[in-house]
Image: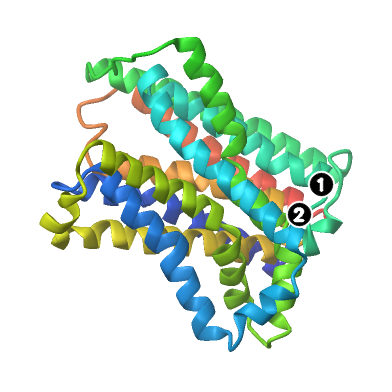
Amino acid sequence: MNASTVLGVLVVALAGLSMGSGAWTLKAIRKLQVEHWLFIGMLIGLVVVPWAVVLVYYPDPAAAYATVPRWALIRSNIFACGWGVANVLCFLCFVRIGVALTGGILGGLGLSLGVMVPMIFKASGLFARSPDLNSPAGYWVLFGVAVMLGAVVLASFAGFGRDKVLKQLQKTSGGFLGGLIMVVIAGILSTGPNFAFAYSQGPIVAAMKAQRAGDVPATFAVWAVGMLGGALVNVGYAMYLMTRNKSWKGLAVNWKETIIPAIGGVQFCLAITLLGHGSLMLGALGASVGWGIYQAMQILGNQGVGFISGEWRGVVGTPRNQMYTAIVILIAASSILAIGNSFV
């Protein structure tokens, strides 16, 4: 395994840990509501920060974007909108079928599709040279995905067991079948950020580098324009919730606390930027391997926040052992994906 692969693995792993641990900002708010957190975090993370970087580094970003094929921009925003819809459906599924089942199905589908699709339908730029699934690298990737799915299932069982021990089984409402259908759709659409970057970064990065930009600013440029659709859906949904709940005034009354979701937005932007940059460092297979490792580390980040915040306090025995085992398996699966990447 060469130095570039190792560094790429570390970067996407850091991206996943950053994204997963971002849940601390939601737990940290006391007076703001979820809709306030979503509104500020997504506005900062998907619009303010990436566009600020673009405007600082590029003398004429509009001219650079004008050279990008229009379909590439449209395609990335279609994927981004799908991801935004997935977020909305995820909230609804929490209520209909519970958090543990939602997380398990959504994570499993998002992981599998996000890893395998770019190997079947070749992405843009560097990723267009990715090997097929029917290749030595492909076999290792499939093996890594299978192992990772086992960890996702085990983590879901651990979540059920934890809630049972703590007697916090969530009351669900609405039809179970409807919720199941929604979470399957959400799982498919949750791959939006990976596909938005993988299938559009080639022409956008080339256009930005023509203006003598470095790799990292070019990655910001992809997210800035490519995730506008996701920003529209997420921020729009938050605005709808604030209007429905008549909670707009909460932003003004609790303005000091808005710094927490703002930090979360910066952390979110940092995570997706590291994901994109690390995936490119991994080479032709980066869109697949990078996403898989990112997803695994995101789960670890989420669980880390859960342990630190006391979600597992008082839980011993099988559920805790299942979660520990799932964590070990996720790390092993990430290593398998990294080995697969070395075959390219």
Q: Is residue 304 left or right of residue 184?
A: left
Q: Nearer the viewer, residue 173 or 244?
A: 244
* Numbered label attached to residue 129: none
Q: Is residue 160 left or right of residue 286?
A: left
Comes first in the chain, label 2 or label 1: 1
Mark 1 element type: helix
Q: Is residue 203 left or right of residue 227?
A: right
Q: Nearer the viewer, residue 321 or 85?
A: 85
**Amino acid type of the residue that numbered disc 1 sits on in the rendered structure:** Ala
- Given contact means CB atoms under 8 Å apart, are the residues at marks 2 and 1 in contact? yes
Q: Is residue 259 above or below residue 318?
A: below
Q: Quick one: label 2, few (<14), some, or many (20+) residues within 10 Å?
A: many
x, y (%) of residue 289? 68, 50
Q: Which residue is mark 1?
A: 137
Q: Which residue is mark 2?
A: 285
x, y (%) of residue 253? 11, 55
Q: Is residue 91 above or below residue 338?
A: above
Residue displayed at 35% across by 22% down: 95
| Gap in angstroms between the C-alphas marked 2 and 1 | 9 Å
Mark 2 vs mark 1: in front: 2
Query: Is residue 338 visible from the viewing direction of this image?
Result: no
Mark 2 element type: loop
**Amino acid type of the residue that numbered disc 2 sits on in the rendered structure:** Leu
Residue displayed at 73% across by 59% down: 72
Give the image quarter of residue 172. Answer: top left
